[in-house]
């Protein structure tokens, strides 16, 4: 027996039946699933119910006090707790018995109208649509209020009628005997499903559901700055609920298509620019494509591979804000892979002028600031 039932209820071992009952009622009010629906509390609620079931019964309490298992079926030896059902006593009945009118206020016929479900549509956008926003026409296949019955679910000229079985209460009561005396339990009425009304002639178009499927198109404005995975909520644009209930929401999930040139990181865009060796050495003006069109960019003389050149404010617009990210150009200096004799001679003359006409082996890693140049290159200097 793992639990100490007295400790669970917070009473002494010699507590009177009245004290046990009071302690239980206080705890049950606190831990009742209607008040506190989280699973941990419900587990605790079950435990105190188990404790109470034993301690409020003088026979079971006696058995428990001497170390027996009050839940074991007669003659079955070590039975253990199989949950509340082992005592042949459903949990909800027990709560009803102790609390009497527990939850009465929340019962009664339930409405046929319920809120519709939310829906999610994925929309593919290219990078510039994400950057600047877009307007899209969407075709939505969803449930709308049935035009024949206006959501009531009944055939034209008829209306829901009060259920004869439950007289419109939506539930039926049963009186049973249990060890606590008479117990009244309520169940949803099987004739009307708990609605309290029946549809004598369901609407032929929607079969009583109050809604039909329909296709409609709608224009949506997608704000600038959305990215892959952004959800845009369109309140009330989801499907209509059953019985003409309020509609759910429609969510648009953005899927950003990859771009041929730009890679997006946050609201910054990154691209590479390959510059011929001579242009990198002498400097040049190059035309660089951006989302806003071509831009003339000055490549400074002496540009190295790995250097970055930011174009401020040419990135993606910030979502729900002002301003834009940057376009960051990563430079790559291209060394010619094939030289004609004349070009080769020019380069050899250049090497001679610079004192670089060295035999192989002179350029060693680690010499002449190799690593610091590499580091500078990585840091974009
Ligand atoms: Zn209908
Ligand atoms: Zn009924």
Image (cartoon, helix red, strand yellow):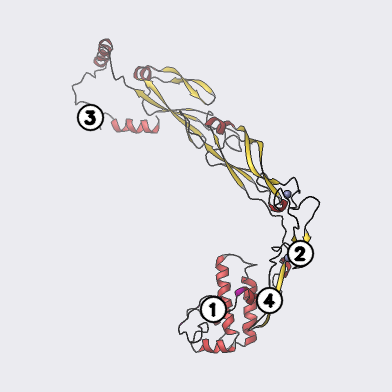
Using residue 198 as the reference point, say whether residue 357 is left or right of it. left
Find residue 241 and report its horizontal and vertical position in percent. Answer: 68, 51
Q: Are marks 4 and 2 in contact (CB under 8 Å)?
A: no
Within-10-Å neighbours for mark 2: few <14, some 14–19, many 20+: many
Find residue 263 and report its horizontal and vertical position in percent. Answer: 46, 33
Count the marks: 4
Does the stretch in magenta take in 46?
A: no
On whether ligand 2 comes within 8 Å of the CB at mark 1, the answer is no
Counting residues from the start of the chain, the first of labels 3 and 2 encountered is 2
Nearer the camera: disc 3 or disc 2: 2
Counting residues from the start of the chain, the first of labels 4 and 1 encountered is 1
Magenta segment's dominant SS is loop
* Magenta region, residue range: 73-91
Nearer the camera: disc 4 or disc 3: 4
Counting residues from the start of the chain, the first of labels 4 and 2 encountered is 4
User: Residues under labels 2 and 1: Cα distance?
Assistant: 36 Å
Does the stretch in magenta take in 80?
A: yes
User: Residues under labels 3 and 1: Cα distance?
Assistant: 84 Å
Could you tell me if residue 10 is visible in this image? no
Find residue 175 and report its horizontal and vertical position in percent. Answer: 69, 78
Q: Are marks 4 and 3 in contact (CB under 8 Å)?
A: no
- In front here: 147 or 291? 147
Nearer the camera: disc 4 or disc 2: 2
Could you tell me if residue 80 is visible in this image? yes
- State the residue at coordinates (61%, 65%): 37
Quarter the C terminus occupies: top left
Residue bearing mark 3: 364
Nearer the camera: disc 4 or disc 1: 1
Q: Tag on residue 99?
A: 4
Residue bearing mark 2: 163
* SS at badge 3: loop
* SS at badge 1: helix
């Amino acid at each position: 027996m793992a639990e100490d039932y007295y400790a669970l209820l917070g009473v002494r071992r010699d507590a009177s039946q009245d004290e046990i009952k009071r302690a239980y009622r206080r705890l049950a009010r606190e831990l009742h699933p209607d008040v506190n629906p989280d699973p941990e509390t419900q587990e605790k609620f079950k435990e105190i119910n188990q404790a109470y079931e034993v301690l409020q019964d003088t026979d079971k309490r006696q058995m428990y006090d001497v170390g027996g298992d009050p839940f074991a079926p007669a003659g079955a030896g070590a039975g253990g707790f199989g949950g509340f059902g082992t005592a042949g006593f459903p949990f909800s009945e027990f709560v009803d018995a102790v609390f009497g009118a527990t939850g009465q206020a929340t019962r009664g016929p339930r409405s046929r109208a319920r809120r519709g479900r939310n829906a999610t549509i994925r929309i593919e956008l290219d990078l510039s649509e994400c950057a600047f926003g877009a307007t899209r026409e969407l075709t939505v296949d969803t449930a709308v209020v049935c035009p024949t019955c206006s959501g009531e679910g009944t055939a034209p000229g008829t209306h829901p009628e009060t259920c004869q079985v439950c007289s419109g209460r939506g539930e039926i009561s049963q009186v049973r005997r249990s060890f606590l005396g008479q117990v009244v339990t309520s169940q949803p009425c099987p004739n009307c499903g708990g609605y309290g009304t029946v549809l004598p002639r369901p609407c032929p178009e929607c079969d009583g559901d109050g809604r039909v499927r329909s296709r409609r198109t709608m224009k949506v404005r997608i704000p600038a700055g959305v990215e892959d995975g952004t959800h845009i909520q369109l309140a009330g644009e989801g499907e209509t609920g059953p019985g003409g209930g309020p509609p759910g929401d429609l969510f648009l999930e953005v899927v950003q298509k990859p771009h041929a040139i730009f890679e997006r990181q946050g609201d910054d865009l990154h691209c590479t620019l390959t510059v011929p060796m001579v242009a990198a050495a002498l400097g040049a003006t190059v035309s660089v494509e951006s989302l806003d069109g071509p831009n003339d960019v000055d490549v400074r003389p002496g540009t190295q591979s790995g250097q970055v050149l930011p174009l401020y404010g040419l990135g993606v617009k910030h979502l729900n804000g002002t301003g834009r990210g940057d376009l960051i150009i990563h430079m790559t200096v291209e060394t010619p892979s094939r030289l004609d004799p004349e070009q080769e001679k020019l380069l050899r003359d250049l090497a001679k002028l610079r004192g670089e006409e060295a035999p192989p082996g002179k350029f060693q890693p680690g010499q002449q600031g190799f690593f610091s140049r590499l580091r500078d290159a990585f840091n974009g200097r």
